[in-house]
Image: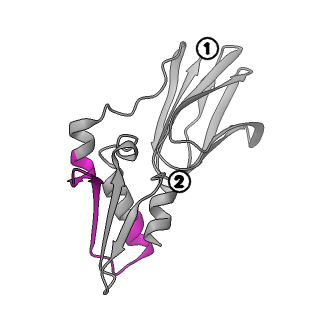
Amino acid sequence: MARATLLRFGFADPRVTVTSSGSTVAATIGKRDACTATRETSSRLAETLRQQIPWLRSVEIVVSPSGSPLSEYVRRHCKPAALPRGNGRVVLTATGASLKTTRSFTVRSRRWSVEYFNGGRHLIGFVLKGAGQSGDSFRTTKRGPGRHVFTGAGTFKLQIAGVGEWTVRVRDGV
């Protein structure tokens, strides 16, 4: 279960060990995966594992070959995860780690964009207009930044589902 959770969070090939009592999970990930994480990834991953395994007492995630804890490695060696840079006025910024519906935002331009950073294996966002889905959406199965352009002015919300951490920013205009 712990390995599957690490895979869902977007870590390509984690090495996972669990103590015989099941109270401690230790995982080792590679440098490449480490720099797609944030400083908060370790604590969010530990929280997710504890929800799945109530008797779990300790979660340790280290980066190979240094042996540094993930949050420390990210702080010392990695550029902060960044959203793509676009044009237009920012009308919404939201972060999460699972399913979330954002607050409403209004777009006045004919074209607008959603910039995102996907910290997990999957991210999908649906554009909601009024009481239902507008039919527009964006989706990615790759960790890292991306951008999707939409057309049509109006007042919208986004319903976002992601495995792992994500951040979105909506720009009025492209």
Residue shown at the point (45%, 57%) measured from the top left: 13
> Looking at the image, is 108 positioned above or below residue 134?
above
114 relative to 69 in the view: left or right: right
> Looking at the image, is 108 positioned above or below residue 98?
above
What residue is shown with label 2?
Answer: 163
> Looking at the image, is 157 positioned above or below residue 160?
above
Q: Give me the disc on residue 101.
A: none
Residue 139 percent location from the top left of the image:
65, 40
Q: Earlier in the sequence, mark 1 or mark 2?
A: 2
Q: Is residue 52 magenta?
A: yes
What residue is shown with label 1?
Answer: 173
Secondary structure beneath label 1: loop
| Of residues 133 and 160, the one drawn nearer to the viewer in this rendering | 160
Secondary structure beneath label 2: loop
> Looking at the image, is 76 positioned above or below residue 92?
below
Residue 88 percent location from the top left of the image:
55, 13
Residue shown at the point (36%, 55%) measured from the top left: 29
Determine crowd level at label 1: few under 14, some 14-19, many 20+ residues with C-alpha closer than 10 A.
Answer: many
Three-letter amino acid code at disc 2?
Answer: Val
User: Which stretch appears magenta?
Assistant: 48-72
Q: Is residue 139 magenta?
A: no
Residue 58 percent location from the top left of the image:
26, 71
Image mark count: 2
